[in-house]
Image: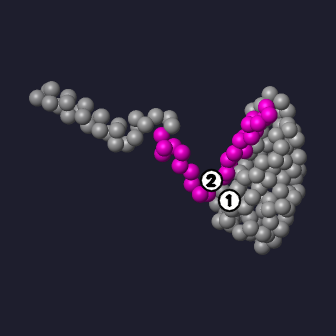
Amino acid sequence: MRLRNTLITATTLVLAISLTGCGAGPDAQSRGITRVTDGAETAITKDGSNIKVRNLLLVELSDGSGTGVLVGSIINSADKEDALLGISVNGIDAQYSGESILTKNSVIQFEGASANAKAVIPGMNVSAGKETVVSLFFAKAGLVTINAIVRDQRDTYAGITA
């Protein structure tokens, strides 16, 4: 009887691990799922650059002006310094202020409690729920374009202002 209970317990444990996917490891397909509302991500790893763009999205202000505000982070993991020279959305230059120099392991954070930069795009005229092209211009890494989703100014993004 004891052997039977041990076998049932072991079989149940093996089935539970295999059916839930816990044995798939750190690169399981289910870990790669992102929601449509997540910010866009990319990396620039050419000519000694190692810049990562994380969670980039735009928030459309609810005042009816068509103005957008950039949200996200830019991280420089390279040994050499770089600089963010400008940002544009659909060919419209952003009004940029704040940190622009990216030393090794430094972060430019748009919006949030630890924000050190702000990018406002007047007249962006892209409604929430759509994607738009964001272009980032770096001194050494060059130009990178990324499709970013536009979110409305509510919930997590309710406190964002121009």
Which numbered disc covers residue 149? Answer: 1
**Going 88% across and 41% down the picture, which residue do you hit?**
139
The answer, for residue 149, to whether it is visible in the render is yes
Q: Do residues under tags 1 and 2 come within 8 Å of each other at their CB atoms?
A: yes
- Asked whether 52 falls inside the magenta stretch, the response is yes
Give above or below for 123 relative to 49.
below
Q: Amino acid at mark 2?
A: Asp
**Quadrant in which the C terminus is drawn:** bottom right
Q: Secondary structure at mark 1?
A: strand
Callout 2: few (<14), some (14-19), or many (20+) C-alpha neighbours within 10 Å? some
Residue 25 in the figure: left or right of residue 74: left
Q: Secondary structure at mark 2?
A: loop
Give above or below for 8 relative to 42.
above
Where is mark 2, residue-wise? Answer: 38
- Mark 1 / mark 2, whichever is N-terminal: 2
Which residue is most to the bottom? 64
In x, y percent, where is residue 143?
A: 82, 47
The residue lying toward the viewer, choosing from 142 and 64, is 142
